[in-house]
Amino acid sequence: MVYLVVCLYTAVLCKDANSFFGFFVDSALTYYLVVYVLRTCLSIDDLTRLISVCLYVMCIIGVIEFITGVNVLSLVSLGEGSEIASTFRDSTLRVRGPYGHPLGYAMVLLLLFPLSCYSREERSVSLFRHKALFLLVFLNVLFTGSRSGIGLFCIEVIILCVFTSRKYRNGTVLFSVAAVLTLVVCAMLFADNTLVQYILRQLFYVVDQVFGTNFALRYGGDASIMNSTVARDRIWKVPFDSSLSPWVGKGVSYQTGAYRIDGWLVRSIDNYYIRTYISYGIFGVIAVLLIFAAFVRANIRRVFDEDKIYLVCLTAGLLYAINLVVVDELATYRYFFIVLAISSAVTSEMRAKTQTDGFRKSRRS
């Protein structure tokens, strides 16, 4: 509600209807629609199965795009097509899947994959519930070339592995060890293979980013890629630009423009929170942080419950919030609200059940 109020007065003051309706239609209505569907039409397992099917389709298309260089979905689009040109890293196409940007595609994969690992019927989590899907998601995240996406996916996998239900724990550990050993053996035996070099290069880009090393150069990496980190550091100084007001933003339809920071011209705002500041001002940032804080608080209180849905939602949502520090939301915010709606629907269901059980007990007594 706080965010909607901020969107409303920004839309009025900036004469920009998209500042309100963009969030209201894409995110708020998505949230209420998913809650309604879960209460009336589908069970949680039905929805997670549907999400798994969607992930299979997206990832298969992603592999085809990586091999052929053709985005299949762009061929059947009835719209004007993506305004964002194809991007490359080390002369290799960065896969976009059904989205206009590879970073956005990586964020959606990270948001949805944990849900495919969950079963409400068993109240359990299994990292390798769908082994083929795990492999496809892993490859697609690599194919996006998103360093933040790859790094956070590794963290996501570790969390899901640690909290895999006891029933599947031994199999998960064995499969994980086998997968790591296979990767190591392939790296040693097929170091000259183009695909193996590409996979190792993407993984070492993340290692180099974290530890300041240069291992990716051994596999054909580009040293200039590290410069993007310097560019992202400059973005934090954008809010101090004299053209921006801390109290009223410029609306979402306002083109980001250019900002002169430390003698450099900053054109791309690769930080959702800074972008929100530009669009909505400081109250917009506060509203966004309130949404994430409320989400984390609601889920972390039940993260050790027998039902692992809260763990799955918290993992997906929290890593998404962290990713937004180095990436704009790129039309992925609505998918976070699907995760938020699933968590809220389960909480409402449990609350209603508790009240019903309490009412029955009181009648018996």
Image (cartoon, rainbow, N blue to C red):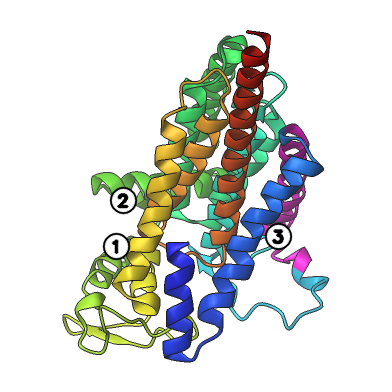
Q: Mark 3 points at which residue?
A: 65
Of circles 1 and 3, the one toward us is: 1
Q: Mark 2 points at which residue?
A: 209
* Residue 249 in sight: yes
Q: Name the residue under label 1.
A: 229
Q: Which of marks 1 and 3 is nearer the N terminus?
A: 3
**In the picture provided, is 126 more to the left or to the right than 146?**
right
Q: In which quarter of the image is residue 248?
A: bottom left
Q: Which of marks 3 and 2 is nearer the N terminus?
A: 3
Task: Kindly identify the residue that appears in the image at 57 percent across and 39 percent down.
Answer: 343
Task: Kindly identify the residue that appears in the image at 48 percent across and 77 percent down.
Answer: 8
Residue 75: percent from left, percent from top: 80, 72
Q: What stretch is highlighted in magenta?
A: 45-73
Q: In this view, does 144 lie above or below 279?
A: above
Question: Which residue is more in the foreground, 278 or 298?
Answer: 298
Question: Which residue is more in the foreground, 79 or 264?
Answer: 79
Residue 81: percent from left, percent from top: 71, 79
* Other residues around mark 1 within 10 Å, as few (<14) / some (14–19) / many (≥20): few
Q: In this view, does 111 lie above or below 98?
A: above
Amino acid at the residue labelled 2: Gln
* Other residues around mark 2 within 10 Å, as few (<14) / some (14–19) / many (≥20): some
